[in-house]
Amino acid sequence: MSFSHLVHDISLRDSISPRRRPEASIASTMDDHASRSSHVSRAMSYTSTAATSVSIAGDISSQLHGGYCHPLARAWQAERQLTKSMLIYPLFISDIDDEEVLIPSLPNQYRRGLNKLIPFLEPLVHKGLRSVVLFGVPMRPGAKDALGTSADDPNGPVIRSIQLLRQRFPQLFIVVDVCLCEYTNHGHCGILRDDGSLNNQLSVDRISDVAISYAKAGAHCVAPSDMNDGRIRAIKLKLIEEGIVHSVTLMSYAAKFSGCLYGPFRDAAGSTPSFGDRKCYQLPPGGRGLARRAIVRDINEGADIIMVKPAGQYLDIISDAKELGKDLPVAAYQVSGEFSMIHAAAKAGVFDLKAMAFESTEGILRAGATIIVSYFTPEFLDWLST
Ligand SMILES: NCc1[nH]cc(CCC(=O)O)c1CC(=O)O
Ligand SMILES: [Zn+2]
Ligand SMILES: [Zn+2]
């Protein structure tokens, strides 16, 4: 197409219908008359400078607005859109079977015993819930010790709920978080040396045993969140040794950062460390290079899915994970603190809850994740149905 043809076309359009000017879509979003008329005069100067071919080419390629003013055209700008099957819903399962307790720092989320689980999940499964991630919470006195013995208690809440969920919801994909911090009396994610640091060998041996118990109980996916070096390899090798590697997905919390955003979770799971913090085994927030090394390491050790956590503050890491592991699904965990912040801000009138919930997941999807662990899952099942 020649430039002179474009000049002709533009002036023809202008003379036939002023509404078809390239600026029409901008003007239509303006509601006061003054700004509308200023756009009209800009449109006229556009037409008058259209005499030189170079500036026309520049102006035409600069017109983006017309491409996305319809809601569907806006949706098409995204590489991928949120679907129900991308969501994993976190569940806190108490060892007190009849318990159902609201977690004050985590809006609308409860810690539930086994007897409350099925009635709660039934309607969600009917609305399209595809996957949950289980966190066991031992509430009974004496349930915690230095080795986290209750983590794989066959009568404990996690193993019993895996069996129950498999039986009652055969289509539900059951992910189980593997860590010791909920079960140790010191609240750290492994077994400690006398000086309070993690003993890597003992921790990895124990955590891989726990993962195998969950897998044997019927978990479709085990997800170690402890961050001990070498646990992905150890779990994969034991899955092979046990002859169950073909039926279990291994999801690594590969890039898990230490920070302020896990507080409500620790309230829910009772897993706040009794001394110190997790800074020596969770990544420093500025450590992008370290996160990339952890991601590559876990891919090489046999992870099937790579997770980044938290999500919103770490979108560059999600994008790195997708680049480094371009043939693996990448998961993002929108953690308790992110969820509670969104709720608090919505309550303070900063924004609309639903709009922000969607915007936050759009960022995560854009960065490259296709699996999202989210406390908004029950709401999304409703929002995505309408
Ligand atoms: N290791 C346990 C674990 N698994 C997932 C989370 C956090 C999830 C959330 O905040 O929603 C934590 C807490 C922690 O590491 O302290
Ligand atoms: Zn049913
Ligand atoms: Zn832990």
Image (spheres, rainbow, N blue to C red):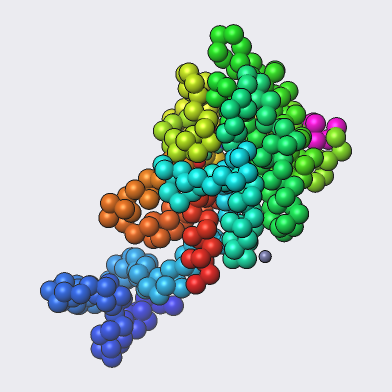
Work out whether 74 lies above or below 159: below
Residue 210: quarter of image = top right
In this rendering, position of residue 340 left or right of residue 246: left
Q: Residue at x 25, y 85 (%)?
A: 18
Pick whichever, 201 or 288, lies toward us. Answer: 201
**Residue 209: horizontal and vertical position, in percent?**
75, 29
Q: Residue at x 44, y 35 (%)?
A: 263
Residue 9 in the magenta stretch? The answer is no
- Residue at 45% of width from left, 72% of height from top? 73
Any part of residue 311 in sight: no
Residue 238 covered by magenta stretch: yes
Q: Position of residue 350 (x, y in %)?
A: 28, 53
Q: Which residues are magenta?
A: 237-241
Quadrant, the N terminus: bottom left
Q: Nearer the viewer, residue 8 or 177?
A: 177
The kind of secondary structure the magenta stretch mainly shows is helix
356 or 162: which is nearer to us?
162
Q: Is residue 298 above or below residue 249?
A: above
Measured from the top left, where is residue 150 in percent x and y?
Answer: 67, 29
Q: Tell me residue 127's x, y (percent).
A: 59, 66
Q: Quadrant of residue 219?
A: top right
Above/below status of 245 relative to 188: below
Q: Name above or below for residue 78 compared with residue 226.
A: below
Please name whichever residue, 173 or 51, is drawn nearer the observer in this view of the structure. 173
